[in-house]
Amino acid sequence: MATAVEIALAKQPYFDLNSLCKTVFVTYKAGPKLDKLVTVQSQYVDICNKPGVRGTVVSLAGSPGSHNDIKYMRDSFEKHNIRLVCTNWPGSEFVTGETHDDTCKCIVQLDSGGLRDSYTNEERNSYVKALMEKLGMKNVEKLIVMGHSRGGESALQMACILSEDRSWPLIGAVMINSPGFVMHRGISVRMGTINTLAYLIKLRWKMIDCVLFPVLDWFYNDFIGLRVADGKVSAAAILPMQTFAFEKQKASMDEMKKKPWVRMFYAYGSKDFLVAESDSEELAMYFKGDHYVIKDKKESEEAIPKIWNSYANGQPYVTANFTEEGHYLQKTYPEFLIQVLGGMFDVETKSSK
């Protein structure tokens, strides 16, 4: 069920960031064994790209999702002088191109780039890292990786990967409405259906696809209730449902606890229609950092200096529970999130005496 803020925002005129899209070719390793090279034409949005910014945030969308996942934060990024790079995943309508298969030396033309990918986390991470390298993210002064929903898992994993190489200017990772350690209710009750659909998708038979893609379009838009462009994009969104990290996130979180120079922030809503509050709370408590409970805008404003103080006192792990909010905190609390990002960039850790 939508929260009061989400209902109010839904009444506003529709808008998107599509007119701001730029295009870049990205080559990355793909396949279950990462033994294939894939090249796609990927669209992205680059906000507030100018000298003197406080830092750069790379956003990773959910599944399904796109650069528009963060559209409600655009004005906040410009207002607070923080650069935002919004990415898209292979298989979405914003990634097109062709795959290059090194094993058979063939090229397969696609109208949705990466549709034949395996959608494992390793493959998704390979794509994101290649895209960030192509966009010169290694050369920015300060970098934060931020993900929403399924993208939150990816942000956590990318933090682990990039922090292994100190030449990356990574200083933080943000997870918004990320899933917990168990299947969320958006897929747990439908896993049998999802596995069947995934099997049919992986057959890549045109006769089946002619029937399957319209069914997938209905399945995602009407049955699950998440907006997708068409059946092909739905197919690309179904496959990652089988590759969530869930319990494996603990290993990534344990790894990040060894790297206190990377600040972490996780925010979730108690009324999330996909992720149960208890699952989100379990993930938040695993960080064993400073935790804030926020019930309204006033409390969110009061929490900002406290969160900054947590980082200043050397606590790299901060979590926040919005008791009256749902699955789209970047939509309902954009100013709060941008203030947290600003603090992660600017607040200096106090020297221990």
Image (spheres, helix red, strand yellow):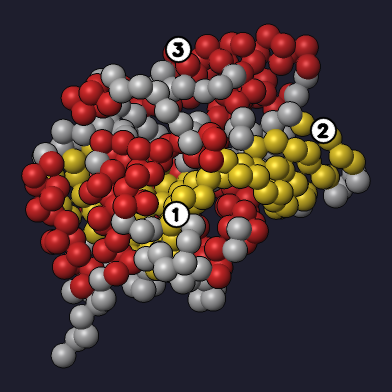
Q: Is residue 94 visible?
A: yes
- Distance CA(mark 3)–CA(mark 2): 30 Å
Depth check, front residue: 116 or 287? 116
| Image quarter in which the N terminus is found | top left
Residue plotted at (11% across, 39% down):
296
Q: Secondary structure at mark 1?
A: loop
Q: Secondary structure at mark 3?
A: helix
Tell me where residue 93 sits by quadrant.
top right
> Sequence-wise, which precedes: disc 1 or disc 3?
1
Residue plotted at (21% across, 73% down):
312
Q: Find disc 1 in the rendering and name its residue.
A: 48
Q: Find disc 2 in the rendering and name its residue.
A: 109
- Distance CA(mark 1)–CA(mark 3): 36 Å
Residue type beneath disc 3: Asp
Residue 279, numbered circle:
none
Residue plotted at (84% across, 35% down):
108
> Sequence-wise, which precedes: disc 3 or disc 2?
2
Mark 1 or 2, closer to the camera: 1
Residue 353 x/y as whole percent: 16, 90
Depth check, front residue: 282 or 346? 346
- Distance CA(mark 1)–CA(mark 2): 34 Å
Q: Secondary structure at mark 2?
A: strand
Residue plotted at (65% across, 37% down):
95
195 versus 344 height, above or below: above
Q: Find disc 3 in the rendering and name its residue.
A: 222
Tell me if 351 is positioned left or right of 37 in this view.
Answer: left
> Sequence-wise, which precedes: disc 1 or disc 2?
1
